[in-house]
Amino acid sequence: MKYKVGIIGFGKMGQTRKKAIDELNVAEVIAISEPNPVTPCNLLNVSHDEIINNPEIDAVIVCTPNFLNKQLTIKALNAGKHVFCEKPPAFTAADVEEIRNAEFKSNGRKLMYGFNHRHHDSIIRMKELVESKKFGKIIWMRGRYGKSVTEDYFTQWRAKKELSGGGIVIDQGIHMLDLFLYLAGDFDTVKAEVSNQYWHSEVEDNAFIILRDSKTGIAASLHSTMSQWRHLFSLEVFMEKGYMVLNGLITSTMSYGEEVLSIAKNRSAAPAATWKDEVKTQYISNNSWRYEMEHFFNAIDNDTDILIGNSYDALRLMKVIDKIYEQKDF
C-alpha cells in the first residue's frame, strides 16, 4: 500500500522531503501546511491541525522552525500518526523525555529524527569500518563545521533564541555531535567555550567543545562556528591501526566542497603514516535524503524499530547539548 503523508512546513526542508518521498514511490503526500508559502504547490491548502487530525493521513513530516518541533510531534503521536521530525528534536533533554512518553503511549507509532548526515554514503562507509574493527578501536575524533552568515540572518527565526533554542551549536554543530555519538558511543565529560563575540547576538556564533568518555578513553573535539568565512565540513576519526578523514559534504549549493573520504588502510612504521598510504573516495551523489525516508517507511511497513535517528539517539544528543549550554556565560 502507499502510505498517505502530510507535511507540516514547506520551506527548503519540506520540499526536500517531498522530493525524496516522491522518488521512493512508497508513499503519497496528500496535504501540506505552510503559513508563509514561497513555492507554489496545489497541496498547500490546510492547517497544521488539519493534517494531524486527518484520518486518511498515516505519517506526518515535521519541517518547521525549531520551537514547533516538540509540540507538533507530540500532537501527531497522540493522534496516532507516525512522525518524522527534523532536528533538533526539542530544546532540552527534558523535552525529549516528554516526547518519548508520548511515543511509548502511541501504540507502536514510529518516530524518527532527521539526523541526515548519518545517511551520507561516506558516513555509512565510516560506520562500517568502525564496526568491522579493521583498524582497531577509536582513539580520538575531531570535527570542524562552519559556515558564514550575513547580517540578514539576524532578521530570521534562527537568530531568535525563543524560536531556535540556540545558535550554531543547535543549528549545525548538532550534526557533528550526533556523528560523534553514532561512531563512538556516549561521552560522560563535556567541556565547552561558547561565545557570541563577533555577531553579539542572543545566540552563540562559536563553540569549542571537548568530549571524553571515561570508560573507553575516547576523546573528541568540535569547533562549530558561524564565522567561518568559507564554509567547512571536516570529520577525522583516528583509530589504533589507521584513520579516516572526511572533508567536504555534498549539499544542494556545494558550498562545503566536494565530499572526499581518505582512509589509511595500513600504518607505516612509527611515528607516522605517509600520504601514499591513503585511499581516497570522492562521492558524487547525495543519496541521503532518499535513504533516510526509505528507513522511515521500511520501519512502518515491516513494523520494525527505527535504528538510525530514533528518540533514544535524540535523548543522548540533547543531554550533551544541555551540558554545552550550561557552560554558556552570556
Image (cartoon, helix red, strand yellow):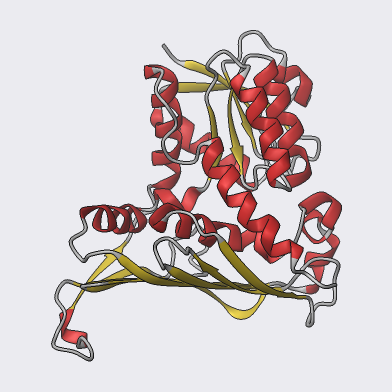
From the top left corner, tell me how far across and down residue 115 is, in percent.
52, 48
From the top left corner, tell me how far across and down residue 289 is, in percent.
45, 44
From the top left corner, tell me how far across and down residue 24 is, in percent.
39, 30
Examine the rendered structure and indicate whether residue 123 appears above or below residue 189.
above
Residue at x 83%, y 57% (from the top left corner): 161
Residue at x 73%, y 62% (from the top left corner): 325
| Res 127 quadrant in image | bottom left
Q: How many discs appear?
A: 0
In the rendered view of the protein, which quadrant contains the N terminus? top left
| Res 18 quadrant in image | top right
Examine the rendered structure and indicate whether residue 61 appears above or below residue 185.
above
| Residue in the foreground of this view, choosing between 225 and 313 | 313
In the rendered view of the protein, which quadrant contains the C terminus? bottom right
* Left or right: where 194 falls relative to 250: right
Q: Among all residues in the image, which is located at the extreme top?
A: 55
Residue at x 75%, y 73% (from the top left corner): 150
* Left or right: where 119 falls relative to 70: left
Confirm whether residue 134 shows in the render: yes
Examine the rendered structure and indicate whether residue 30 appears above or below residue 224.
above
From the top left corner, tell me how far across and down residue 226 is, in percent.
67, 73
